[in-house]
Amino acid sequence: MMMQDQSPTGKGKGYLALLTTSLVWGTTWVASKVGVKEIPALQMAYIRQFLAGLLFVGFFLFYKKLPLPSRKQFKWITVMAILMFVFANGLSTWSLKYIPTGLAALIGALYPLSVVIIEWLFFKSQRIGGLTFLGLLLGIAGIGIVFYENVFHHLDIGYFIGLGLSLVAMLGWSLGTVFLSRNKANMNPYFGTGWQMLISSVILFIFAETTQPTVAITAISLKVWAMIFYLVIFGSVISFVAFIYSMKKLPPAVSSLYAYINPLVAMLVAALVLKEKLTLNILWGSLVTLVGVFLVNYSIKKNKPTPLVEAEI
């Protein structure tokens, strides 16, 4: 369990870290959307993860002088890499090729709901009470409202492919969360994440280069490189450091608020920058969904010391 700094200075910096995480992770959806318009999504994902992983691993190996992970830790890292970065990050990036940014971000925010269902179905470790059930119902209903508002403007097979990719990505994150909660690794979280990024980049590289035409590195435009730079430095390094910091400095109920803010940031920025459709129904459906996620987290928090959205560390 993390020790929290209750001093005013510590909390003030914690709130700044929370704001950074919420805003940056919301805008990374838009940066990814811009990138996948010019290069294959999986190519963009493996470049991003390789560069970010290299920064993390290089820092801890050569500056902090940490030893290489043990064989047992590498097994754990590989499972997490596949679930969190190949499926969750890789497929969610791919889904942006086909569906609106805000919808992809909103589906990603649903993962606490599927964690509850997985725990209940396979481990019998969750009790679905009235509040949890209401949250599940609202989460699904809100997505239904957003889907209904979008579907008649995207009646093609690509839209449904994007939905499928986004749902599988969300399920991958959920399974990773469940695995992490039941299999702890005694290692620095930043170091472990760096290795997960590197391993996943190799897997995605092999898959992308053998299944689809990719763009030569020298042919990638400056605009896409700018998006990749933003995703690596801000989306993968700065925001993750801020996320861990906010977890240490703020109460769990406060530090988990990023999960409800970044989908809304993604929608608003996508509407402003990419001119994506944003109606009252989409906003209303999004709020209903996020209220549902909040209720599920709140109901689980009453039975567990750690809310689901914190299980990423």
Image: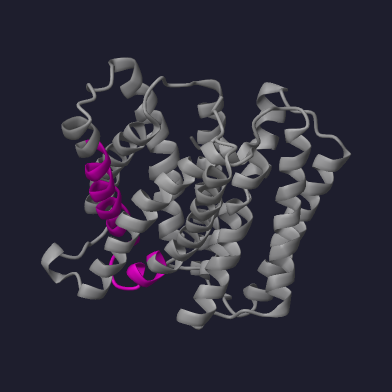
Inspect this view and state whether residue 274 appears: no
| Residue 38 horizontal side relative to residue 249, left or right | left
Please identify the quarter of the rendering in which residue 185 is found: top left
Q: Is residue 294 above or below residue 270?
A: above
Inspect this view and state whether residue 217 appears: yes
Q: At x 37% / y 23%, what residue is drawn?
A: 187
**Coordinates of residue 79 in the picture (x, y in percent):** 40, 29
Q: At x 71% / y 49%, what residue is drawn?
A: 293
The image quadrant where one finds the N terminus is top right
| Residue 19 horizontal side relative to residue 238, left or right | right
In the displayed image of the protein, which residue is found farthest to the right?
130
Please identify the quarter of the rendering in which residue 36 is found: bottom left
Indicate yes or no whether the magenta region holds residue 197. no
**Coordinates of residue 6 in the picture (x, y in percent):** 60, 37
Magenta-highlighted residues: 32-57
**Coordinates of residue 47 in the picture (x, y in percent):** 25, 54
Indicate yes or no whether the magenta region holds residue 50. yes
Please identify the quarter of the rendering in which residue 193 is found: top left
Residue closest to the eye, 6 or 303: 6
